[in-house]
Amino acid sequence: MPVITNIDDLKRIYRRRVPRMFYDYCESGSWTEQTFRENTTDYEQIRLRQRVAVDMTGRSTATQMIGQDVAMPVALAPVGLTGMQNADGEIKAAKAALKFGVPFTLSTMSINSIEDVAEATNAPFWFQLYTMRDTDYVSRLIQRAKDAKCSALVITLDLQILGQRHKDIKNGLSAPPKLTPSTIANLATKWTWGLEMLRAKRREFGNIVGHVEGVSDAADLGAWTAEQFDPALDWDKVAKLKEQWGGKVILKGILDAEDARMALKVGADAIIVSNHGGRQLDGALSSIAALPAILDAVGDQIEVHVDGGIRSGQDVLKAMALGAKGTYIGRAFIYGLGAMGQAGVTSALEVIHKELDTSMALCGETSVKDLGRHNLLVPKDFGGVWQD
């Protein structure tokens, strides 16, 4: 068993084990990938304020996200195709999150279905919804999430049309993989992944195949999905989805203060400042750069979370110190899942928790709830001023 001390250790193993098209699906953005890169590098502009001679005993990273107790302010973000990164990946990730004490969010575009995860974990999880033109399907999907006792609905707002993702197009991304000469050559080098996948519960989109008329295989699914994302999504439709759900709603994909105010107006319980991991509008602000203005606009009226670019516990600390009430990891847990399955997801969570706890102590804080802008030395763009 390799010694894992940071998320990059998991990423290196992940890259060796997982087929190229699924690695590229995770580790890429749209167009030039500027926003994808800046999601991570913009965290590096924020400096931590070290304090000394402070009693560091009795530290706690525990807090709440939308009223739910969490071991640390980190949730597993919804990631499509998770079950292609590792056999039964959504189930393994959900189990790791449950055991660690953080929320797991299942994507609409998951391989394991809502019912699969509910049966395997027997505990509430969050469900992420893409709005689609087939309103009957969306209504049934919401009801399935209710029946599975999902405790929050995460509505993604920034995928009305698909961003230009060059690597996915060139790789012919599909689930299961289409067997072309280049795909076969790559799969031949990933034989451990292949053997595990043969034993997987599913290898197609479990929330769709068998639940949509006329969709029975990968070919049907590709054609259906390409036509289904709803370009007519507006705030009236968001309000109707919230009413239909009837429980806690988190709106994902907010990058602008005005949109944050609209989310507040429709009665969302929380928003996620997010640019879809840099996979939609390239050239948009990084999530962490967009966070301060949104917090200044609505932060005392609605719970504000952030995702995109988080690769360490220090990134979590910086987001929380800026004023977020929760964070999400996507790629970081996928690295762990692809590298070592459920144990790898646990390892990713342990790494981030260790870094958060240690860095919090060295900043002179004993509770994650006490983090604030006083812990940071930040550029003016992030709501502060460099201190020499």
Image (tube, helix red, strand yellow):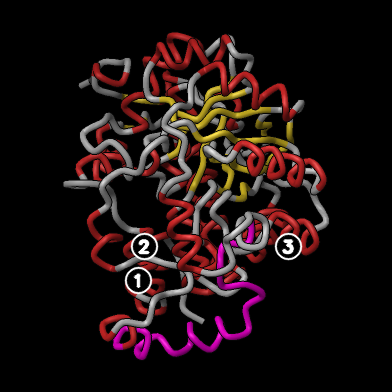
Magenta stretch: includes residue 155: no
Up the image or down, 272 lies above or below 340; here it is above
Q: Secondary structure at mark 1?
A: helix
Magenta stretch: includes residue 194: yes
Image depth: mark 2 or mark 3 in front: 3
Q: Residue at x 47, y 31 (%)?
A: 157
Query: Which residue is the site of mark 1?
Result: 12
Find the distance from the CA under tag 2 to the CA under tag 1. Answer: 6 Å
Query: Which residue is the site of mark 2?
Result: 8
Residue 248, given in percent of the width and then of the height, sits at 71, 28
Q: Residue at x 25, y 60 (%)?
A: 167
Q: Is residue 243 left or right of residue 11?
A: right
Query: Which residue is the site of mark 3?
Result: 116
Would you identify the image quadrant in which residue 61 lies? top right
Q: Secondary structure at mark 3?
A: helix
Would you identify the image quadrant in which residue 95 lies? bottom right
Name the amino acid type tagged 3: Asp
Q: Secondary structure at mark 2?
A: helix
